[in-house]
Image: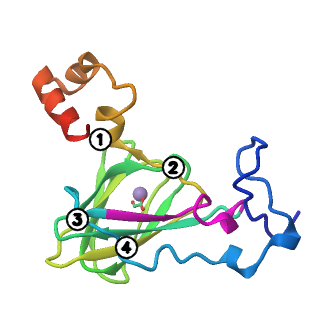
Amino acid sequence: MKDFCVADLNATVSLNGFPCKPVAEVTSDDFFFDGLSKEGNTDNPFGFAVAQGNVLSFPGLNTLGISMNRVDLAPRGINAPHSHPRATESIVVIKGKVLVGFVSTSNVYFYKVLTVGQMFVIPRGLVHFQYNVGHSKASLLTAFNSQLPGAVIVSRTLFASNPPIPNQILTKTFQVDDDVINSIKSKFA
Ligand code: GLV
Ligand code: MN
């Protein structure tokens, strides 16, 4: 086994992960990532920005089983309900006051309002969100036990897939009329 396997993102071989860049070509920069240092632009309807430090942006993480994101939230901004199929997530607030919550497979809602330095953990695969309940901007760092946790964003999955899920599935699922579904779909078009 090797100490590290910096991802060769351009390799053509197909496997579950990335093959290693030749050791002679590895430098200190391969173990450095600056992508979480700046506040993201939250000027959007969700008041939300995420910067992802996963193997695709930070190839030095390849085979190491970890990654991190930075989330910025405007006041009342939301990181909408989503789940990570490949990772547990731990969250630490670095600025502001944030409501974090998840729902278990028994449909119990677990939540907490976090201030700076406080942590919360989201067990693998469960649907969760973060919402800025403070009066100023909020930022958090999230850490994953996967180099590429993946994200299933509930709203986009159901209302903005490609091709779209047929309305009859969604009207039946949510027990509403077509116009409700069309209205939600139009927001994600
Ligand atoms: C937050 O939930 C994140 O996935 O970064
Ligand atoms: Mn998450």
User: What residue type is disc 2 on?
Assistant: Gly
Residue receiving disc 3: 43
For badge 4, the amino acid type reads Leu
Left or right, 53 with reference to 112 = right
What secondary structure is found at the residue carrying circle 3? loop
Contact? badges 3 and 1 (CB < 8 Å) = no
Residue 187 lies, with reference to residue 17, above or below; the image says above
Disc 1 to disc 2, C-alpha distance: 15 Å
Q: Which mark is residue 172?
A: none
The mark found on residue 155 in the picture is: 1
Q: Secondary structure at mark 1?
A: helix
Q: Around disc 1, counting alpha carbons within 10 Å, would you say few (fewer than 14), some (14 to 19), or many (20 or more)? A: some
Mark 3 near mark 4, Cβ–Cβ under 8 Å? no
Please report the residue visible at 20 percent of the width from the left and 21 percent of the height from the top: 171
Identify which residue is drawn at 71% across, 50% down: 17
- The verdict on label 4 being within 8 Å of ligand 1 is yes
Q: In the displayed structure, would residue 179 be above or below residue 92? A: above
> Which region shows up in magenta?
49-63
Q: Quadrant of ligand 1?
A: bottom left
Residue 74 falls inside the magenta stretch: no
Where residue 69 appears, x then y in whole percent? Answer: 46, 67
Residue to which mark 2 is pinned: 150
Q: Dot 4 surroundings within 10 Å: few (below 14), some, or many (20 or more)?
A: many
> Which label's residue is closer to the chain start, 3 or 4?
3
**Residue 140: which numbered mark, if any?**
4
Mark positioned earlier in the residue sequence (1 or 2):
2
Looking at numbered disc 1 in the image, what kind of residue is underneath it? Ser
